[in-house]
Structure formats: structure tokens, C-alpha cells
Amino acid sequence: MALMLDANVTSNLVPSVNWDTLNSSVSGRLFQYAPFARACFEDAEGVVGTYDVNACAFAQAHYSDGQYRDTIPSSYQGLQWETCPSKGESCLLDWTNPLNEAAFDAPKTCHQGSIPTYFLDVQTATDVQNAFKFSVETGVNLVVKNTGHEFQGRSARPGSLALWTKNLQKIEYEPAWIPTGCEDTAPRTVVRLGPGITFSDLYAFGEANNITLPGGSTPSVSATGGYVLGGGHGSLSNTAGLGTDRALEFTIVVPTGDVLTANACQNTDLYFALRGGGGGTFGVVMETVTLALPRTPIHVITLDGLSSDTDTTKAFWKVLVDNSLEWANAGWGGVAGATSLQYVNPLPITEEEARTSMQPLTEFAAQLNLTVGQEQYDSFALFYQQVLEPLYAISGFPLSTVSRLLPAKNFETSTSREELLEALLNASANHSLTYVFATTPYAYKADNLTSLTPAWRDSLLLIEVLDTLEYNATASEQKTVIEGLSKSMDYLRNITPDSGTYFSESDLYEPEFENSFWGANYERLAEIKVKYDPLHILDCWHCVGWKGRSDEAYSCYP
């Protein structure tokens, strides 16, 4: 149960602002929301709501429920962004054991942390226009908040107004769509999405309409939003492209107040920027039109039960490194960790061809008395619902991550593969989790109208290394973890100097972030930012046109 109050409650953080005026202009949909675990704390400072034993028990029971967290504006899937580490302020439970009373018993006090002061439940473009006008007139910072799945705190900021888009729930199937203003274009099969639609929603809708809608793995992540705007990878990306590639049109409210349609025929500069330039930067996207594919069967290869000891991990990852180039060319994509693998192939190959292609993995597994699973599913959605969704349903814990795209040239010779394997092992050593994502668009032929780093196009793998944090980690402790991760990623950066990484799942301290996220596209993106946001109303960490760390808005960052 979330705690909220309406806008008539005076904010302690921005007391001089007349929030009632804004509330009237948005039909009373302006709210203050307490932190997710507010009800567990007897003492609170500058936070709405009250101590409530029953509401606390409910929060404890749903603490790691990503899909429930989606419905709470003040909830973040990365819990560190509900806190203000630099001031030692938070309102968290112990994510490893939400019943642990040490997290909330007196004298522990609940603070708002980095959670915005107010949330606007966006329903119309006019709501966004009024919020932009309000920000200009009052100086109140804005953030764009959807499901709260992001690692850099871009949708959290103390004292800010959050434009919450989760309730924009449109989802429509259009089998013969033509882009606005592109009358000479051949019709395509698409789905029109509001930012509140999650992957769980998307896959079910695609299955019901006999189409394939590629996407990511976590069910509670928005299928558009920051996922598409920052790139968006998933198990089908190798052959179907990134989320950015499949986005064919956007309806957006830009900070100048205009409501624009951006596609390949109109506002083409904005279209370019929205296809990889990052969320929370160029405006608030109200709708996205995304390409749908035919519903086709997929081949699935799985391996589970691997030991996490160093020798086994090295042998396993050697198989991945030695075969990634061949597998990508054959249509395979998916994800592996230290102890498991789930790969899919949507191409029309036979079971025998699939088996032959994956023979190196089968032979490796046999040496460990393990068996590689091989199945064929009638659709990607069915595979997702039965296999992937249960694996990625848990959310709601504090973590930090680093990542790197690994170019195909690093896989071409035995020497380069040995060097890569050693760097990968060093980068992952002594960290909580490592993901080997075969989710780059290597086999996909892009239209060159995207703004993310070109490194995505010639890379075979995206590596992500993560560390979880203690619920009560101090700013110093968080900084130590982040710096340790960043230093570890240098092993991969050093052998991939011309590569980059994923805007949405990157090092909080990413060096030369402009080049890492966008490469040569950054200069053009910076010009587009000035055109559509000349007053710089929208600003976020390591985003296009970022003001820099010295801005007071980033005072809570470790």
C-alpha cells in the first residue's frame, strides 16, 4: 500500500512554490508520495504518511515484487536511488530480509532521500506542457519517471517534480500502418504503445495478435520509455535489431511546449535523437510506434547447473568467446551468466542444424555430466512466459553496474580470443554478478537513422558486471563499490579502445561518457538538444547536454 497525499500538503523541500496552481492546471493529478517502506518507520522527517503496522507488513511482502513496484511512483527498482547517500538519508528495508527490524526500528528515521517531492500523473500532452511552464517559472527541477528501471538515478532527484508516465497505457495493433507524412511509404505492421506498457504486457499482446514483438527480459520494464530511447537490447536483437531500430515514430512533448510527431519524414533530427540519444533529455514521449514481426517458432538452447568456481567459469566462457562469432552469424542470441545460458534462434533452421551449431556447448556440458536443453517453442512470447519471465521477475535491490561492448575483431584470432577471455575473467573477479549478453544487433541490417554509438553494430557481446549494495551502505561505501567496478571494467576498456557501452546500463562514473554512449553522433545530438530544449529544462546524469556534477541537483550522488 503506497502512501500519498494531494498537492495541498506543503512541501518542506520547496516551501516557496505554489503547487496548488500547478495542481489546478493538471486536473488535480499532482501528488506527494512517501517512500515505499514509509509505513515501517515510527519516525520520519519531511515525509508524508504515518507509521502503520499492517501497511508495513504489505510493503515487506512486496519489497522485491517488480511489477507491484511499477505501480508506485516513489518506488525505484534500484533502491539506492530512493536514498541520499551523501546526507545519510534513506527509508529502506533490508532487501535481503525485509522483516529485519534493525532496518527500521527507532532511532532509525525515514527520509525522502532522492525521491522527488511531487509526482504528476501524466495523462495528456497538456499536463506536460503545464509542467514545463511551471518549471521555467519556478525553477523547480523536472525528471521523467516511468517504471523506475535505470541504474544512474536519472529519474530521481531531491526537491524535484517527476512527470510520471506509467499510466499512459495505450496499446494498439495496426496491421497496415503508414508513418505520418510518409504517404509514399509501403504499409508496415506495427503496435502503438504508451510508455506505461511493460514487457509482460507487450508479449501477451503480441501472442494474442499472432505477431512477435521483440524486447527485453525483465517483465516490469517499460517496453518503450528509456528502454527504446537508450537503445534497448534483448534475446532477439541479433536478428531483429535493438528497440531503437524498431521504433518508427514518436509522439513527444518537447520542452518548448510543442507536441511533435517524429519519424523518417518529419522532424527527422528529433527522430534521430530519440532513437538512441537517451531518455529524460529531449522531451516526454507520449506514444511510440514500434515494428511488429510475424509470429514464428524459435529454437531454444539452455544450460543450467554450472558450478561458479573459477575453473568452470573460465572453461564455460572460453566456449562462448570461441564460438560467439559463428553463433551470431547463425542467428543465435541470448544471455549467459557464470552458471547458466539461455540462447534463442528465430531463423528457419532445422533441429539438426540447431544441434550441430551448438555442438561445442554440448561437448563442454558433457565433460561436466550436464545436458544441454534443446527445445522449439511456437513463439518467442511463449518461451519468455515459461522460461525468462520467472528468472527476471525479482526487482527492488540496490546495485551498481558497469558494462562494455565487445567488438567482433576481438574474437577473430586465437590470440585475441585468449586476451579477451583473460580480460573478461579479470573484469568479473570478486563481483556479485556478470552477464554475457549476446544481444547486440550484429546480424541485423540497420537503417543508419539511430544515434547510439556505432560500436553496437560491430560488437558480438555486451558484458555487464554488477555488485549489490547493503541497504544501509554509506556514500563512502557506495563510492568504493562503484570505483571498484569501474577499475575492473578497465580490463575490457583497454583491449577495446574504439568501442563503447550501453547508455542505460553503464558505469556511474563512465569515463568520456559522450564517446562511450554516442561516439561521433554526440556533437549532432548536442545541437538537437539546444534546438528542442533551449532553456535546458531537462537535465540528467551523463545525458546529452549534461550540466555536470557540480549542479546542486546531483548533490545526493556518491
Image (cartoon, rainbow, N blue to C red):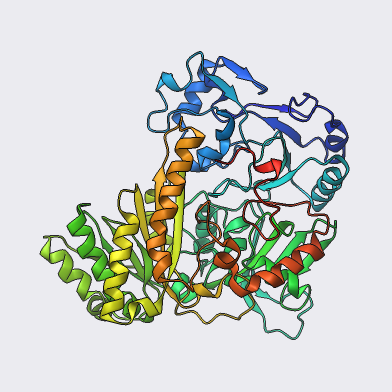
Front in this rendered view, residue 280 or 228: 280
**Residue 389 visible in the current orientation:** no
Q: Quadrant of the C terminus?
A: top right
Front in this rendered view, residue 120 or 116: 116
Q: Residue 400 in the image: state x and y as whole percent.
A: 46, 47
Q: Quadrant of the N terminus?
A: top right
* 405 on left or right of 229: left
Q: Residue at x 44, y 29 (%)?
A: 61
Front in this rendered view, residue 252 or 404: 404
Q: Residue 360 in the image: state x and y as whole percent.
A: 20, 74
Q: Residue 14 in the image: state x and y as whole percent.
A: 78, 30
Q: Which of the 4 image quarters holds residue 314?
A: bottom left
Q: Residue at x 12, y 60 (%)?
A: 368
**Residue 455 visible in the current orientation:** yes
Q: Residue at x 58, y 67 (%)?
A: 515
Front in this rendered view, residue 517 or 258: 517
